[in-house]
Amino acid sequence: MTGQEIVVENPDIIEVDINSEVLPCKNTINLLNLGLISDENVNTPTVLLILNQHIDIGQLFIKLWQNSSIRVCADGAANRLYDFFQDDEERLKFIPDYIIGDLDSIKEDVFKFYQSLNVVIIKQTTQYSTDFTKCVNLISVHYNSPSFREYIQQNKSEKNHGIELESGIHQLYNEMIQNIESVGTIPCINLMVINGIGGRFDQTIHSITQLYLLKRQDPYFQMSFITNTDIIILIPKGGTMLEFDSKFRQKCIGNCGLLPIGEPTTIIETCGLKWDVKHWDTNISSGKVSSNNRFVGQDRCYFYVKDDLVLNIEIFLDNIIEYI
Ligand SMILES: Nc1ncnc2c1ncn2[C@@H]1O[C@H](COP(=O)(O)OP(=O)(O)OP(=O)(O)O)[C@@H](O)[C@H]1O
Ligand SMILES: Cc1ncc(C[n+]2csc(CCO)c2C)c(N)n1
């Protein structure tokens, strides 16, 4: 489908009303439901995945922790969790469910501390996947392999909880996928990732690859990266309505970018941006990217894109902490 390329500059507030007979709207993403409110109030479990960089989101970290059902540290992320707190009294209130990785980054005293608290610590030595992907496979089997949690409990005293040392978690994941008729039937899991963006560049790009990869491979994950400046999500190809509270938009979010990082694509139509586009080809290498845009839709914004696209949304950390 092609048409004339259009950019419309909108007033600072508009109503977004989509005619679903004309425009597709298969997906709905609610910004607050990504993990900013407790998963007890949303019908989807939320997992907090902590990667190995300094935790720099202040008290939002505590909120995200409280909003989650399970918390997973990728290897050295356990050091960051440990260091976030002043003393053991505080640390004891924030014990992760799992630590997994090649375990070359976790400090010995941190390992011992969490081991003494019966945290499930899984070593996976393979150098052909990152600690990030080890975490993601672990979260998949935790939720979708009925026997996994039982197995972990039964093998508490076994070396490595009975999981093969090199890449056992990937094997368990592959078995799980084979035993499931269709990944389309797996219930949704909110995966909130912190510390994956903005550090070393290859690690940051690796994080972005996971956004694209999970959409294809494990579409039951609704993944988001949260940093001290942004929420980053994937807008899947097709039509998507992004919802938010009007007050949340006014107080907590700022600029946004529609970023064709994975591949050049066409933004067929948007509705609810300050600069809405139609039939807009976008391409990193040509420099045509909608950055410095923002939401003007009262409480939602519609996207219709030819291929998956990365969306970053600026957040105002202090206001979010106050709001949620
Ligand atoms: N500087 C960084 N910037 C962004 N993400 C990072 C950075 N360092 C680590 N991470 C993330 O945290 C995870 C765990 O990191 P850790 O330092 O423990 O292991 P690593 O040996 O660097 O990573 P891996 O073993 O996965 O290659 C990594 O897989 C990566 O996703
Ligand atoms: C082509 C290729 N490039 C890089 C690595 C290295 N690597 C990728 S993931 C990982 C794990 C780190 O814990 C390491 C070392 C590789 N194996 N293959």
Image: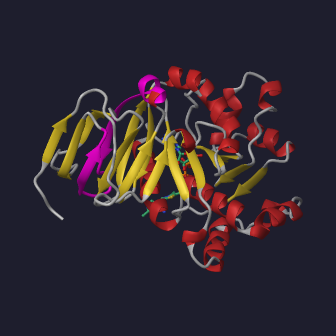
Q: Measured along the vertical axis of the image, is residue 288 above or below residue 153?
A: above
Q: Residue at x 70, y 57 (%)?
A: 123
Q: Nearer the viewer, residue 187 or 84?
A: 187
Residue 205 visible in the current orientation = no
Q: Position of residue 247 (x, y in %)?
A: 47, 26
Q: Looking at this view, is 269 or 186 the one in front?
A: 269
Q: Position of residue 280 (x, y in %)?
A: 18, 51
Q: Is residue 323 above or below residue 117?
A: above
Q: Quadrant of the C terminus?
A: top right
Q: Position of residue 97 (x, y in %)?
A: 75, 48
Residue 1 within the magenta-colored segment of the rendering: no
Rendered residue at 24%/52% (across/down):
267
Q: List x then y, in percent, for residue 56.
A: 55, 28
**Left or right: 256 as drawn, with respect to 30:** left
Q: Which residues are magenta?
A: 247-272
Depth order, front residue of 88/109? 88
**Foreground residue, 88 or 233?**
233
Compared with 315, 115 (above or below) is below
To which quarter of the image does residue 34 belong? top right
